[in-house]
Amino acid sequence: MAPPMGGQEESHMESHSPVADPGHVVKSSPVMIDGVALNGPTLDVSAAEGFIQQSMAIIMEDAVRKATNVREKVCEWRSPEQLKELLDLELKDGGEAQSKILQRCRDAIRYSVKTTHPRFFNQLYAGMEPYSMVGSFIIEAIKPSLYTYEVAPVFTLMEEAVLKKMMEFLGWEEGGDGIFNPGGSVSNMYAMNVARFHHCPDIKELGLSAVPRLVMFTSQECHYSISKAAAFLGIGTKNVYVVPSDKRGKMIPAALEEQIKKAKNEGAEPFMVNATAGTTVLGAFDPIEEIADICEKYNLWLHVDACWGGAALLSKKHRHLLKGIHRANSVAWNPHKMLMACLQCCAFMVRDKTGLLQRCHSARASYLFQQDKFYDVSYDTGDKSIQCSRKPDAFKFWLMWKALGTSELERRVDRAFAMARYLAQEIKKREGFRLLMEPEYANVCFWYIPPSLRNMPESPEFWQKLHTVGPAVKERMMKKGSMMVSYQPHGDKVNFFRMIIISPQASREDMDFVLDEIDRLGQDL
Amino acid sequence: MAPPMGGQEESHMESHSPVADPGHVVKSSPVMIDGVALNGPTLDVSAAEGFIQQSMAIIMEDAVRKATNVREKVCEWRSPEQLKELLDLELKDGGEAQSKILQRCRDAIRYSVKTTHPRFFNQLYAGMEPYSMVGSFIIEAIKPSLYTYEVAPVFTLMEEAVLKKMMEFLGWEEGGDGIFNPGGSVSNMYAMNVARFHHCPDIKELGLSAVPRLVMFTSQECHYSISKAAAFLGIGTKNVYVVPSDKRGKMIPAALEEQIKKAKNEGAEPFMVNATAGTTVLGAFDPIEEIADICEKYNLWLHVDACWGGAALLSKKHRHLLKGIHRANSVAWNPHKMLMACLQCCAFMVRDKTGLLQRCHSARASYLFQQDKFYDVSYDTGDKSIQCSRKPDAFKFWLMWKALGTSELERRVDRAFAMARYLAQEIKKREGFRLLMEPEYANVCFWYIPPSLRNMPESPEFWQKLHTVGPAVKERMMKKGSMMVSYQPHGDKVNFFRMIIISPQASREDMDFVLDEIDRLGQDL
């Protein structure tokens, strides 16, 4: 079966007679090479446009309107086995008609989780941001790649503008350097690579086998990407020294200093501290100012993983949580989380202005970064990157920032903070709910204690039973499709719920709904 | 100035009265926390929809229809200084009206390079692929992240299906494992990390400082990401031993064996060979079969970087170029290059079926990869990844494969090969053009010799002058906007043009046009 858009060369010929080019003569005799006729394009662009147009209507209806409607389900749960049958995944020799493909688009949307739904509270990102969404559509349509100015002029400049503005919020009065990249995990890797290169530039050429054992420090509450990065970068997970946190989840500075001394006594070479601004589970902020003092004392690179918490910098009321961040050597900050830029949108920034990022990562590919170009090649930023093709994620954030202005971004952040406090208050008022701790950010952690456990003493058996409540309620909410809230054990705490509040689509009524719904779903447990 | 879509809470209330939820009572008294009113959503979803709808019309017209029209310019060149002025990049306190933002979308598209234009031949990707484009729009609209089945059920299964099919083309009869990730450079990093973990699993915990100097081998023609990866992974760029290639750009197997022996004599520990299938500049294919023999003999991991050349596997006529790839331990292959899936779409695959990829990269985050979930958690594939959030790039490829079928993909690959041969023939026929070598793949490398140099002896002065032709013609083509073709020096060769042929939108007429246009632009040089 011939696919609908290919293989029918004759019908596409007339759409492609570029008469505007004086030197271009359309040859009418078909040229055959290796049995392939080469005259004219074989893609029917107008048929393609028709398909895209029809798809856009489906996307608008199902992936935008329905997906964000609070009356619709957050998810339409199917088991892997059921879903495999529904989706008919196998790729075959023949193509399918456009109408079939449009149905496949509808199905893909239907069975996907609606992360833009007002009641999706499951991850550190959520909600619909229309400007950023449109920015991402533009990127997908014109397929830019951000290595050279010649291929991505607009987006190169926008990235620069966004980084400059973000660095203002870091309080880096003299600016710095930076790069957007695919995920906070990758940003943290950049930090570790730049920090060790700064510590010992020979590592780039000679590798780690030529230097003493390098060690770094992070809190027990840090994101798991630090451990992944240590493995990936050849540092080794055991050379990440874990610093205890206090009950709120904040790194204990005295414990950091102890660990540094311990490492030095062992003959290891400390090179970096990772502080977390907004931990993944508890939403805690490490005390950056005190950690910066210690880093100065021991001459260590200070990286702040502010992927989640960086947004608080936009709030005059709450930015004190990141006090001292102006002293960081590098910062990771993901506008795709609290600030709702479309996935992915992640900045890595260094305070250095001597070209460290470039020196650390450059490979000077002569086919891409030619030095005899006709424009200022300092705009070819690709050699700062560990990637070759790179998506212009900054554009999505630039466009929404232009539309909303800093003031609206600030209002949203303040509202998320306030909403988390409202939810915490309600939890404290309600029977059967118990708050783990007052929220510092937009993570609200709590247990739901079903009626059967409410009069039980807090014995090991109680905790064991409570541990099973999270998974059971989660299963029920997903099968019902009413909302998505995550649960997890944490340290010595059995499974509890973690609500993440981000989107301006979510209201106080949704907070009440979440508690009501958990109570409804868990009554009989 | 209030942004158009935020801050006017009262007007959005009625769009959000979720009466369908029996337990949900809308409270009418406003609740204030920290001075923030929390009733109702503050995002006007219907206004957002209106904006998205209007944007889609612009995207359709400017980023799809105009961008792919051969009569329109490929690029609208502006210098960084001019463009900064035109774009008004600064981010401000207040937001902007929707009409202004729509104009900004138009401007971003206008001044961007149209990589989907039939005359964009500048990179290893090009052209418009409507199905994959629609797939990417869907992804952007519903914002899935691929770590757990619960958040991305559809895309988890599609990734599995696509990898399975791609591994069939590798000839891995028993399958394997794999993951999509943001770029071929990252895929090559995966390969190096998996290979060294396989060589010595302790590295994950202990790091490279605990083991002897590990070295790897690649050809002088390999992609620069190998060098970047060696630096990033702590291996060190000097521990990448460069193997000479022959005149066509293929690794010389005997030279590889020599390098391995040399490394061993130095006391280094070889762990991996990278073979390239489709080099970046010349489009050469390393002799995989011979390299595999050597890898077996010395017990080395064989990785094949088939990011660019992997597509030839779909062609019965041309797949012999990758003969022996079934013996590779790992393969990187980017469907976003020759196969035209929207950027980015990059698969990394390992032949191992014992969970090596997972063991090598896992960090077992308990808040994300809970083991007490109600479904089969082997579908939570995120811990194989070095990322946390990860985009479901496989979906874009899955959708286009479903639409086109393997047979149309094969036809396209065969056509690109044939088109490259046609262009080479024409180059040989024309005065003032000189082919560097017969193309093996879809890269056609050639010099343009302007009239002033045609009767000159091939002295150092001749080559010096010829070296300046590429940059000069490139500047002119970009300022005119008529096409984009890259140039570069390479080894001992002065600047030459490299045409990359991919898209079915490009025709024989466009090949003729490129040669005519270079001749027009370079006549007076």
Image (cartoon, coloured by chain):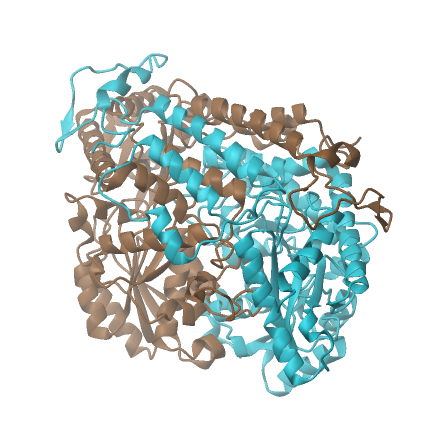
Chain colours: A cyan, B brown
Of residues B356 and A296, which is closer to you in this image? B356
Q: Is residue B411 above or below residue B294?
A: above
Q: Residue at x 46, y 47 (%)?
A: A111
Position of residue B227 in the picture relative to residue B274 (left or right):
right
Of residues A521 and A66, which is closer to you in this image? A521
Residue B169 spot, x, y in % from top left: 23, 52
Q: Is residue B294 above or below residue B312?
A: below
Of residues A300 and B390, which is closer to you in this image? B390
Residue B332 spot, x, y in % from top left: 33, 55
Q: Residue at x 53, y 32 (%)?
A: A60
Question: Which quadrant is the C terminus of chain A positioned in?
Answer: bottom right
Position of residue A112 in the picture relative to residue A262 (left or right):
left
Question: Which quadrant is the N terminus of chain A positioned in?
Answer: top left
Of residues B85 and B427, which is closer to you in this image? B85
Residue A228 spot, x, y in % from top left: 51, 68
Position of residue A512 in the picture relative to residue B212 (left or right):
right
Quadrant of residue A164 within the rendered picture? top right
Position of residue A49 in the picture relative to residue B446 (left or right):
right
Q: Residue at x 37, y 39 (%)?
A: B125
Q: Is residue A450 above or below residue B53?
A: below
Quadrant of residue A329 within the rendered picture? bottom right
Q: Residue at x 80, y 64 (%)?
A: A428
